[in-house]
């Protein structure tokens, strides 16, 4: 087949044909869990596209105006230009409400996809050498995504977002020595000031997206260079990759999945209402909404704040509000620091410094899996506690008792999850080892000449055997070991199935 003159000339000048051919033949393994990272990537693309649309009409100003738009309940009310422009996008711009809700849903999906992708990487050990840096980048992207979401839902300057900013200001003030200065720096004076929206706007549309784009680029480059991890199976080793090439298989699937993700987000934006700011009204420092809840990814901070007892001390003339500092500053800082440092901590504890390209099954690493389950439980309890008032109201529960339940669960829950998960993993290991060495139950019962009964055990499927760790793959050495004694009448030979 001839080569186009333009491509031939380009290859003569840049020598790109060989590198392009090699990269287009690169193999990627096929497993549904690998799509979690793609969901995050495509949600980020939709965030950029819908956010660019919204910037044409949003006004990041806290200058007070009188609303005279089409929404009758707020006509004549005083509000900031930021809130008024949000109402304009929702009610007057063609397709504005759809794009605004798609933007919000894409943000929620973006954070959720990063979160679940990190869980997949953690439980399968895909963060081990040589991918430690990519794990740290992933944790950094999660933090940036949370910050991006918080700045985004703070921009409309409605009552809900203003309440969130008020909580954020309290967190800043709890930091010893520098808290007051940080609060004045962010808000330009006493809360709420008149410049915080204008300061959050470039952070939301420029600084954090640029950092995310840079981290996403480095992350994808590292995945490309280091090759993708894969699950244990037939013909899969630490030195190869079993999968489909970039063209046409992987590219076609990725494009289809991009369109599918966009379709789901568009459907949510069209049919599932989210953040109806017109129902909350403009923010005023003297008002607060009942059952005010932040987006799910910062709900755990709300929960820890609600559970912490009111404790304050005075040291050297400075008041330290431990009930805010510990749950909202120390706890998340410690949590994400341990999370980012986990590959290095595990390597130091286990002494495993070998490169790994085959993923673990969670059951095969029970301690790590149990720690992950404990972390999820800790996060889940704190998240649920962030809505304790809603739970108490709609489930007709005592709020005081509910708070104490969550306080106890915050300590006992992770411990219980650790113990149960580890025992389940050990039990699954024993079942796998039994299957590898004795075979799989066939359901066929035979009677021995001596009168006893035993079940015929068959060798495990080669594909299933390949998924087991190498230490399990010795298998039965003699055909007679596949027979396991079940029961026998009087005079039956009790050892018929094993001798």
Image: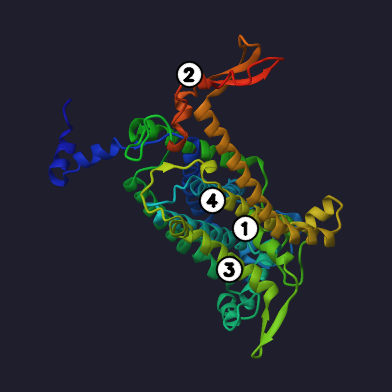
Which one is earlier in the sequence, the residue at label 3 or at label 2?
A: 3
Compared with 199, 131 (above or below) is above
User: In the drawing, what numbered circle is on residue 479?
Assistant: 2
Which one is earlier in the sequence, the residue at label 4 or at label 2?
A: 4
Gap between marks 3 and 1 measured at Cα: 13 Å
Assess disc 2: are there few (<14), some (14-19) or many (≥20) residues with their C-alpha within 10 Å of its C-alpha. few
Can you tell which of label 3 and label 1 is closer to the viewer?
Answer: 3
Gap between marks 4 and 2 measured at Cα: 37 Å
Which one is earlier in the sequence, the residue at label 3 or at label 4?
A: 3
Q: Seen in the image, is 70 located left or right of residue 475?
A: right
Which one is earlier in the sequence, the residue at label 1 or at label 4?
A: 1
At a point 64% along the width and 80% down the height, the residue shown is: 190
Disc 1: which residue: 86
Residue 60 visible here: no
Disc 3: which residue: 197
Q: Are marks 2 and 1 in contact (CB under 8 Å)?
A: no
């Amino acid at each position: 087949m001839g080569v186009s003159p333009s491509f031939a000339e380009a290859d003569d000048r840049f020598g790109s044909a060989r590198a392009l051919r090699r990269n287009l033949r690169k193999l990627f393994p096929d497993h549904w869990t690998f799509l979690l990272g793609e969901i995050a990537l495509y949600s980020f693309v939709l965030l950029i596209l819908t956010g660019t649309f919204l910037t044409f009409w949003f006004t990041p100003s806290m200058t007070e105006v009188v609303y005279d738009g089409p929404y009758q309940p707020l006509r004549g009310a005083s509000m900031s230009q930021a809130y008024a422009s949000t109402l304009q996008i929702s009610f007057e711009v063609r397709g504005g409400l759809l794009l605004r809700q798609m933007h919000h849903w894409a943000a929620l999906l973006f954070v959720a996809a990063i979160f679940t992708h990190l869980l997949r990487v953690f439980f399968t050990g895909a963060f081990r050498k040589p991918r430690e840096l990519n794990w740290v980048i992933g944790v950094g992207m999660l933090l940036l995504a949370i910050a991006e979401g918080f700045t985004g839902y703070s921009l409309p300057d409605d009552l809900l977002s203003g309440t969130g900013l008020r909580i954020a200001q309290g967190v800043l003030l709890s930091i010893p020595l520098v808290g007051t200065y940080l609060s004045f720096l962010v808000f330009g004076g006493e809360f709420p000031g008149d410049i915080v929206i204008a300061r959050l706007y470039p952070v939301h549309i420029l600084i954090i997206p640029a950092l995310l784009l840079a981290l996403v680029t480095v992350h994808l480059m590292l995945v490309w260079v280091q090759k993708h991890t894969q699950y244990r199976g037939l013909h899969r080793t630490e030195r190869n990759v079993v999968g489909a090439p970039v063209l046409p298989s992987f590219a076609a699937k990725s494009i289809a999945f991009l369109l599918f993700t966009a379709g789901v987000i568009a459907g949510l934006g069209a049919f599932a209402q989210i953040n109806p700011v017109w129902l909350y009204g403009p923010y005023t420092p003297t008002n607060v909404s009942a059952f005010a809840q932040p987006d799910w990814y910062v709900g755990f901070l709300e929960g820890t704040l609600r559970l912490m007892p009111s404790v304050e001390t005075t040291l050297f003339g400075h008041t330290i509000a431990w009930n805010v500092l510990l749950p909202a500053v120390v706890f998340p800082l410690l949590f994400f620091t341990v999370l980012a440092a986990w590959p290095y901590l595990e390597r130091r504890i286990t002494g495993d410094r070998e490169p790994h390209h085959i993923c673990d099954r969670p059951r095969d690493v029970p301690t790590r899996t149990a720690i992950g389950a404990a972390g999820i439980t800790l996060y889940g309890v704190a998240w649920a506690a962030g809505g304790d008032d809603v739970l108490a109201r709609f489930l007709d529960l005592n709020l005081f008792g509910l708070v104490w339940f969550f306080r106890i669960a915050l300590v006992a829950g992770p411990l219980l999850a650790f113990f149960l998960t580890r025992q389940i993993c050990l039990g699954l290991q024993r079942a796998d080892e039994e299957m590898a060495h004795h075979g799989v139950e066939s359901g066929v019962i035979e009677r021995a000449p001596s009168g006893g009964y035993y079940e015929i055990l068959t060798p495990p499927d080669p594909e299933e055997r390949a998924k087991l760790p190498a230490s399990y793959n010795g298998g039965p050495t003699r055909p007679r070991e596949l027979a396991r004694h079940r029961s026998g009448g009087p005079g039956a030979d009790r050892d018929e199935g094993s001798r």
